[in-house]
Amino acid sequence: MSKEHEEAVHAYHTANQLIIDTHNPLQGINDLGCIFDKSGNSSASLLETMKGSLTMQLLLPILQHKLHLDRPLQEEEMESIRLSPYNHALWEITFRKPLAEITDHLSHQIFNDHQPPGVPKGHTHDEAIQSYNSHLQNSFDSNWEIPVVQIKLDDYRPMAVGIVDRGSSEDDRSHMALMNKLIEQPKTIETVEISMVDSPDREATLFDLISALYNKPLLDQVQVVNISQGFFAPEGNPVLEKALRQVGKPVVCSAGNFDTDDHEMPHWPSHYSNSMEHVISVGALKNGWLGNKPAHESNKGAEGVTLFAKGAWSDEIQGTSLAAAWVSHLVALSFAKNKSATYTLDGFVETVKGMPGIEIDQKDNQESRTGYRIFPSDE
């Protein structure tokens, strides 16, 4: 299959969905009266609203080209449409039939050749950004203490971290709230919630993640972005890659918890650390009788993991989600100390080495690209 055809759909899409970026908003969108909620879900009636419109007439040939159809695509072949409220060039199209039945250019087999961890054989990945990143229940006890090392700076500039996640910290048992506890520090680091979906009980999709990365009003408020979410797939997604590149500031991602080599089954978006300097993929350390070592369940690999950091904060709270959140905290703290949000990995490491209560080791092995392990010095 050619690269051009590969970009039409990826194995981790649902069999009947396509995410496209038209680069510019299509003419007539502003005349449709589209209604969006804050989580990026377009109104259920968007497809009905668009029928027969100029926007639909412009969208159909684009989809036809993406699917490499040698016939006109019909409106009736679509089941639903979503349009990002933050980027009106970003679309999610759900078709009534699997894409492999719509076009001969897409084999049924591409959806089943590579099964991500946890997906039953013969099923496609449902595109949900599932709970691979943290060994947590859907909720956690809000009374659990997280003993984050509080490093006080005498002279600093306050910084902010954007948390791309599910739900809201108003629900103190949500995943968003847990990340917030690890990242924020009074007066020094504030957090900005960039919700993919408005409820922690709802699964976020790839489209929700991409859409959130275009939430410019919130992204403009932060110096660091934390994504403690992810999914497994054999290939990256060009629309997600474009969204990450335009963020333009450090993006700290959890490496995933499935005890796999990231080369054998890449975890996304963390695997983009292999090709983007501003993406930092974080594996989880666990302290044992041999000291701080990569946790058994954490993903590893020099091609997709940048470094490892403390990921176990109690028997119940551990995983790469937590490790990434703590690294986001440290990156923001290094910016606060330097009074500058300019990021390089070497600069970050040197700044953190000079902070009390933090230790950095470097191991010469293939657990990560850099070999760095970051943890509190009392461990």
Image (cartoon, rainbow, N blue to C red):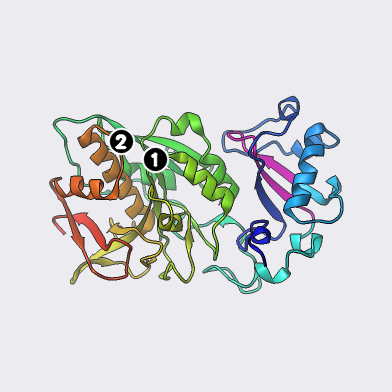
The 10 Å Cα crowd at callout 2, few under 14, some 14 to 19, many 20 or more, is: many
Asked if residue 95 is among those painted magenta in the image, a careful observer would answer yes
Q: Secondary structure at mark 2?
A: loop
> Is residue 265 magenta-colored?
no
Dot 2 corresponds to which residue? 341
Q: Residue 248 location, x and y as percent?
A: 43, 39
Q: Is residue 237 above or below residue 113?
A: above
At horizontal 68% and vertical 30% (from top left) the residue drawn is 35
- In the image, the segment drawn in magenta is 80-96
Q: Is residue 202 visible?
A: no
Q: Quadrant of the C terminus?
A: bottom left
Comparing 56 with 22, the one in front is 22
Q: Is residue 254 visible?
A: yes
Callout 2, which amino acid?
A: Ala
Above/below status of 363 relative to 51: below
Q: Is 28 on the left-hand or right-hand side of 370?
A: right
- Amino acid found under the numbered disc labelled 1: Lys
Which residue in the protein does label 1 denote? 249
Q: Earlier in the sequence, mark 1 or mark 2?
A: 1
* Residue 319 x, y percent position in the rendering: 36, 59
Identify the residue shown where x is 47% and y is 54%.
269
Q: Is there a contact, CB below 8 Å, between mark 1 and mark 2? A: yes
Q: Answer with the quarter of the image where residue 191 lies.
A: top left
Q: In the rendered view of the protein, which quadrant contains the N terminus?
A: bottom right
In this rendering, position of residue 367 left or right of residue 92: left
| Image coords of residue 22 (percent x, y) | 67, 41
